[in-house]
């Protein structure tokens, strides 16, 4: 897993918020309701040494205690348990999240911010924070995070008026909320806990992996005889990378996340592409239902839909890539994997049956 992540859902249930002293709060949040909500909020404090203080120069955010917030939509908690928690577990690389609790409802208005800080462990077993950003249009408010010399920026302002986003990070990650430029950001902050008696998940393994990959990349760069490019085959198949790496699954997301962190400081560029290998030849009948490829098949290889790490089209033509299959591929060539599609051309008079694998 990674030390911090974000994920946006275009379709998600609203929680059906009901707030003591205010009543039901419909979503998406309107400017009128946001201003009225501030009347029942308090300025959010922060910890400094052993003190808890309020200072708008450091933290300018409105909050409502969890005890005053209830969820009236019966579909909200099942969705949170079956969709959000597994997403957090996968992204942070955690085997189990035994419990979670709402900590605060947070409201950010224009100018709201929180200078760099680190979360305190607010309850026994807490190892991470999850923030659910509810439908409410705003601009700005990027979350800047850092850990072990690595940095990330999470920005969920796009389509914020109608989407629901998750942000999650380990408690020992330093982070900063940049000022809201316009609009209102409404969020639910949750504490995430490990199972009772189990060691709390930590970032030590992630840090060691980052250090090891950094060493490999720098050694590669310093070797003048090494390959200038290579292709790493992802574990899963994807139809498109047009919207960045948010669609990556499991180990693919973990590996790309580390490379994203290291690419710029190690002076590497990362691209996604669709690689296709076509193998066409005579079909040799083994039985009435099973055919084998004959000898000397025709082989063709293409690379398509090249995009950068953010999902934007590459700034070079596909002909410039000049990839060689299988020489530039790791850990194996395309023909060492199970083919994704098989086609028969069928009998055509005296012409033999043709088999196409790709």
Image: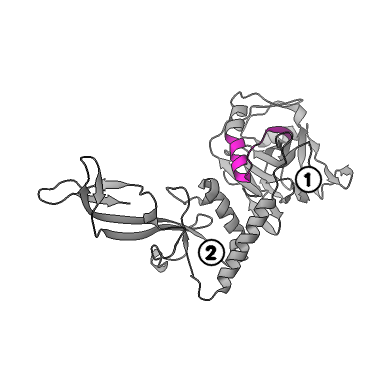
Q: Is residue 356 above or below residue 20?
A: below
Residue 162, position in %: x, y? 57, 38
Q: Kindly report which numbered mark, 2 or 1, lies closer to the viewer in this rendering.
A: 2
Count of numbered badges drawn on the protein: 2
In the rendered image, which residue does mark 1 sit on?
60
N-terminal-most mark, 2 or 1: 1
Residue range highlighted in magenta: 83-104
Circle 1 Cα neighbour tier, 10 Å, few/some/many (<14 / 14–19 / ≥20): many
Residue 160's x, y, as percent?
Answer: 60, 42
| In the rendered image, the vertical position of residue 127 relative to residue 65, given as above or below | below
Q: Nearer the viewer, residue 171 or 319?
A: 171
Tell me the tag on residue 264: none
Residue 160 seen in render? no
> Are the two marked residues, 2 and 1, in contact with CB atoms closer than 8 angstroms?
no
319 above or below 28?
below
Measured from the top left, where is residue 110 in percent x and y?
Answer: 71, 46
Would you place residue 128 above or below residue 273 in this image? Answer: above
In the picture as drawn, the residue positioned furthest to the right comes out as: 50
Q: Is residue 102 magenta?
A: yes
Residue at 23 percent across and 40 percent down: it is 289
Residue 167 at x, y percent in the picture:
65, 43
Residue 66 visible in the shown view: yes
121 in magenta: no
285 horizontally vs 155: left or right: left
Residue for point 36% across, 47% down: 340
Q: 19 and 128: which one is in front?
A: 128
Q: CA distance from mark 2 to mark 1?
A: 38 Å
Q: To which quarter of the image does residue 286 belong?
A: top left
Label 1 element class? strand
Q: Is residue 185 left or right of residue 59?
A: left
In the picture of the structure, the residue carrying the numbered disc 2 is 269
Looking at the rendered structure, the secondary structure element under dot 2 is loop
């Amino acid at each position: 897993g990674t030390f911090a992540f974000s994920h946006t859902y275009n379709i998600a249930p609203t929680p059906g918020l009901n707030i003591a002293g205010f009543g039901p709060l419909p979503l998406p949040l309107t400017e009128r309701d946001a201003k009225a909500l501030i009347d029942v909020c308090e300025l959010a404090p922060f910890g400094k040494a052993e003190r808890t203080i309020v200072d708008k120069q450091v933290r300018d955010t409105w909050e409502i205690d969890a005890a005053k917030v209830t969820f009236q939509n019966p579909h909200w908690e099942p969705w949170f348990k079956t969709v959000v928690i597994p997403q957090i577990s996968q992204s942070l690389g955690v085997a189990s999240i035994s419990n979670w609790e709402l900590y605060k409802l947070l409201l950010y208005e224009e100018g709201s911010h929180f200078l760099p800080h680190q979360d305190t462990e607010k309850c026994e077993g807490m190892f991470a924070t999850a923030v659910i950003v509810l439908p409410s249009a705003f601009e700005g408010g990027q979350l800047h995070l850092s850990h072990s010399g690595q940095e990330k920026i999470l920005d969920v302002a796009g389509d914020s008026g109608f989407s629901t986003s998750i942000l999650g990070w380990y408690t020992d990650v330093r982070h900063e909320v940049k000022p809201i430029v316009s609009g209102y950001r409404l969020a639910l902050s949750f504490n995430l806990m490990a199972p009772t008696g189990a060691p709390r998940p930590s970032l030590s393994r992630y840090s060691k992996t980052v250090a090891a990959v950094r060493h490999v990349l720098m050694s590669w760069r310093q070797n003048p005889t090494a390959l200038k490019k290579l292709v790493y085959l992802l574990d899963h198949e994807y139809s498109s990378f047009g919207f960045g790496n948010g669609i990556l699954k499991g180990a693919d997301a973990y590996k790309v996340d580390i490379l994203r962190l290291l690419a710029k400081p190690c002076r590497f560029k990362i691209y996604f592409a669709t690689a296709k290998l076509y193998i066409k030849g005579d079909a040799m009948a083994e039985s009435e239902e099973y055919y084998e490829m004959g000898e000397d098949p025709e082989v063709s290889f293409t690379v398509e839909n090249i995009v950068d790490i953010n999902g934007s089209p590459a700034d070079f033509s596909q002909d410039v890539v000049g990839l060689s299959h299988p020489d530039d591929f790791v850990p194996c060539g395309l023909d060492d994997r199970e083919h994704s599609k098989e086609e028969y051309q069928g009998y055509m008079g005296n012409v033999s049956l043709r088999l196409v694998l790709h």
